[in-house]
Image (cartoon, rainbow, N blue to C red):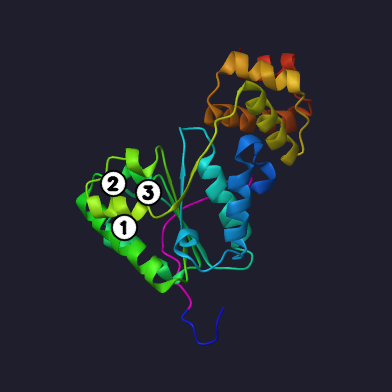
Amino acid sequence: MAAGKQQPQQLTLAVQLPDDENFTTYLEQQNDSVVRWLKRIADKSVTETQGERLTLLSGASGSGKSHLLHSVVSLGSQTTHVMYLPLAELKHSDAEQVLAGLDAFDIICLDDIDAVLTDPDWCYELFKLINRVTDAGHSRLIMTASASASQLDVELPDLRSRIQWATAFQLSPLDDDGKAKALTLRAQWRGLQLPHDVAMFMLHRLGRDMAGLLAHLDQLDKASIAHQRKLTIPFIKQVLAI
């Protein structure tokens, strides 16, 4: 941090990030170029050009957008000032108050921007924030949305044009094998052994939604500790009553 520079003030927002969502627990597969890009931003090794100041990650629910933002926060906060805001949870808040002063941070992570893009006030404040970020050249703004900039429903046309300035990445969803591997990877981070066939059983019996699968894994983690049992198919059937 440059001498004499004002330190950004942490917004008083109760945002609790999952401690098991980092680059180590993210299964890259076809998204390896996205991971490389975000790691460069997190350690501020990108160059001072407009394309690097703005990044847009798009993809369907469960494609790992939030996981990647959480990973940027986990890595970036070790050496820089980082702010993460889940806009889907904040869409009923005052946009000006939420976004004011964010450009003082080195890295700004805005999750689910499409949750607020039909609100004129939010659009105007996002437009101003992007202008401040691109004009000052200090901050890096990373946004996520369910679709690319050209496909988003945006109330303010000028905001759409600003979002289109961003370096854009479309996240590739995981297939069933990838989801099973992602579950195994997350289990390993927790100190659990989840064999691939057991992870595949979870997919077949519990559905393919990653958020739901991870919630079940959390439940199994607690049960495994309480009963001192390994994650086997019979044990999972017992705990989850399936």
Q: Which residues are magenta?
A: 7-20
Q: Which mark is residue 37?
A: none
Where 166 sits versus 148, above or below? below
Question: Mark 3: which secondary structure?
Answer: helix
Question: Mark 1: which secondary structure?
Answer: helix
Q: Amino acid at mark 1?
A: Leu
The mark that comes first in sequence, 2 or 3, is 3
Q: Is residue 61 visible?
A: yes
Q: Which residue is mark 1?
A: 126
> Are dots 2 and 1 in contact, CB under 8 Å?
yes
Residue 193: x and y in percent read 78, 30
Q: 112 or 31: which is nearer to us? A: 31
Q: Amino acid at mark 2?
A: Leu
Question: Which of the two marks, 2 or 3, is nearer to us in this view?
Answer: 2
Residue 43: x and y in percent read 62, 63
Quarter placement of the C terminus: top right
Q: Could you tell me how far apart the alpha carbons at marks 2 and 1 are, in whole angstroms?
A: 9 Å
Q: Residues within 10 Å of mark 3 (few under 14, many from 20)?
A: many
Quarter residue 134 falls in = bottom left
Quarter placement of the N terminus: bottom right
Q: Is residue 124 magenta?
A: no
Q: Which mark is residue 117?
A: 2
Q: Which residue is mark 3?
A: 87
